[in-house]
Image: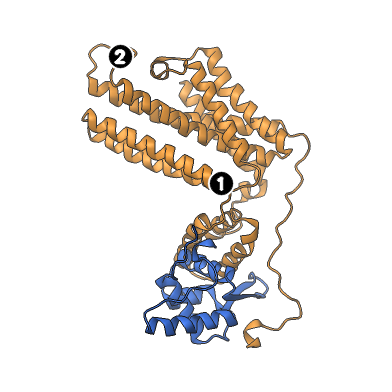
Chain colours: A blue, B orange
């Protein structure tokens, strides 16, 4: 049976934070601090968003002694979804992206 | 005295294993701090398709300062790694072990309530829960390693069946049988050695062989503990005669305590001797495992933050 759960409140917070400045690349820790999520909650959300094609990722080379850092921002589909989410919440219905939230 | 000897041998074995794994780190101490080592270990548990996410966590940790901040970030990531799907077949093994562990705790609690055991037995129950949680954590890590789950669980079944066969597959035997020296040699040395060696021979990799031995030890320990607790629940103070003057409550408490000690000893001994078997069966020097690809950073690309 396929479940089609709406995104969680934490996921919505992450989407909104990313959608606030959709062109800007974000660091994981900064994002976690902004939306007040622990890394244990943030990373599964980011993984699910990336699996669903809503999140774009990139690597930033680190300085000599530090490792490369992962960066995140919404894809065009992610921006559409975040916008639809905002609009739908005003109308009290939550849009569902293409697949299951639980599949990631 | 034999108990102390076994524990000393196990500690010696663990020391040798740590030295063999990384002689430099063993002598000089770790080069990285604890959060980095912990997260590096956890990242290895992720499936191949999630490898980049482990690197992402490590990369982020590499830019964090402050011990507490780094530790909190690492602990969060550790939880994420342990829960992050896909688990594949490992999920079935983990659920089976959780069922056995929860069943064991439930049996223990039911016996403790039924016979009105004292505070000491409830403290032992709390210790049991902590140990079982550790067992499940270790099992979940091992089950997700490639090539370990099926041989490890089969090895555990083999170890458990060997112990039960010696005890005659009866509840009475589980509580009352004291193995002879020959049986002890077979169960404590022969069977774990065979499991560890089989793990290495099958995979042609002593690292996998050692993991197989550890998973076999954990699964066998859990299974035998469940069976022994079930035996206490069924027989109560009946079965093999106890020392004269012992009350029913004392007999039950003693049997539950013995089961707990057996759980720890069986696991420790099987894992240690199995490790030795895996190492001894090494056919050739281990070739380094194929390195997982690191994060792909386009050489010519500008800073991604400036793209937008």
- Where residue B198 sits in the image (x, y, percent)? 67, 31
Can see residue A101? yes
Q: Residues within 10 Å of mark 1 (few under 14, many from 20)?
A: many
Mark 2 or 1: the one toward you = 1
- SS of the residue at dot 2? loop
**Where is A52 relative to B3, above or below?**
below
User: Along the horizontal axis of the image, is B79 left or right of A89?
Assistant: right
Can see residue B135? no
**Quadrant into which the N terminus of chain B falls:** top left
Q: How many marks?
A: 2
Question: Residue B171, which numbered label?
Answer: none
- Where residue A41 sits in the image (x, y, percent)? 46, 66
Q: Quadrant of residue B207?
A: top right
Real-space Cα separation, disc 2 to disc 1, in angstroms: 42 Å
**Quadrant into which the C terminus of chain B falls:** bottom right
Q: Earlier in the sequence, mark 2 or mark 1?
A: 1
User: Along the horizontal axis of the image, is B299 left or right of B37?
Assistant: right
Query: Quick one: A25 or B124, which is closer to the camera?
Result: A25
Q: Quadrant of residue A8?
A: bottom left
Chain bearing mark 2: B
Residue at the front extreme? Answer: A1
Query: Quick one: A78 or B37, which is closer to the camera?
Result: A78
Q: Quadrant of residue B105?
A: top left
- SS of the residue at dot 1? helix
Residue at x 37%, y 23% (from the top left corner): B231
Residue at x 78%, y 37% (from the top left corner): B284
Question: Residue B90, which numbered label?
Answer: 1
Q: According to the image, label 2 marks what residue?
A: B242
- Where residue B159 sits in the image (x, y, percent)? 55, 27
- Where residue B278 sits in the image (x, y, percent)? 66, 33
Residue at x 47%, y 62% (from the top left corner): A3
């Amino acid at each position: 049976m396929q479940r089609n759960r709406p995104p969680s409140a934490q996921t919505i917070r992450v989407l909104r934070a990313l959608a606030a400045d959709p062109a800007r690349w974000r660091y994981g820790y900064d994002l976690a601090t902004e939306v007040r999520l622990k890394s244990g909650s943030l990373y599964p959300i980011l993984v699910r968003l990336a699996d669903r094609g809503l999140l774009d990722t990139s690597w930033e080379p680190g300085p000599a002694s530090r490792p490369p850092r992962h960066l995140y921002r919404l894809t065009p589909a992610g921006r559409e979804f975040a916008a639809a989410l905002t609009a739908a919440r005003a109308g009290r219905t939550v849009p569902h992206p293409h697949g299951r939230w639980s599949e990631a | 005295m034999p108990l102390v000897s076994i524990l000393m041998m196990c500690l010696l074995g663990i020391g040798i294993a740590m030295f063999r794994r990384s002689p430099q780190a063993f002598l000089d101490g770790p080069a990285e701090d604890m959060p980095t080592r912990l997260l590096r270990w956890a990242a290895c548990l992720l499936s191949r398709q999630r490898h980049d996410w482990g690197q992402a966590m490590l990369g982020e940790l590499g830019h964090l300062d402050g011990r507490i901040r780094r530790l909190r970030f690492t602990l969060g990531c550790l939880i994420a790694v342990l829960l992050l799907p896909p688990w594949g077949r490992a999920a079935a093994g983990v659920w089976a072990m959780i069922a056995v562990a929860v069943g064991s705790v439930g049996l223990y609690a039911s016996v403790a309530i039924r016979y009105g055991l004292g505070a000491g037995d409830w403290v032992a129950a709390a210790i049991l829960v902590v140990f079982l949680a550790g067992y499940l954590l270790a099992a979940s890590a091992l089950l997700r390693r490639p090539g370990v789950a099926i041989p490890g669980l089969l090895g555990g079944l083999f170890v458990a069946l060997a112990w039960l066969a010696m005890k005659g597959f009866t509840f009475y035997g589980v509580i009352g049988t004291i193995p002879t020296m020959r049986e002890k040699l077979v169960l404590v040395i022969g069977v774990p050695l065979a499991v560890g060696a089989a793990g290495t021979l099958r995979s042609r990799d002593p690292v996998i062989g050692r993991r197989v031995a550890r998973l076999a030890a954990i699964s066998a320990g859990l299974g035998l503990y469940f069976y022994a607790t079930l035996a206490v629940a069924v027989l109560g103070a009946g079965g093999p005669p106890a020392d004269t003057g012992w009350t029913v409550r004392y007999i039950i408490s003693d049997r539950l305590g013995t089961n707990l000690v057996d759980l720890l000893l069986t696991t420790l001994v099987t894992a240690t001797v199995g490790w030795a078997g895996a190492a001894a069966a090494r056919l050739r020097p281990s070739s380094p495992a194929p390195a997982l690809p690191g994060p792909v950073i386009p050489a010519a690309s500008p800073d991604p933050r400036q793209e937008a």
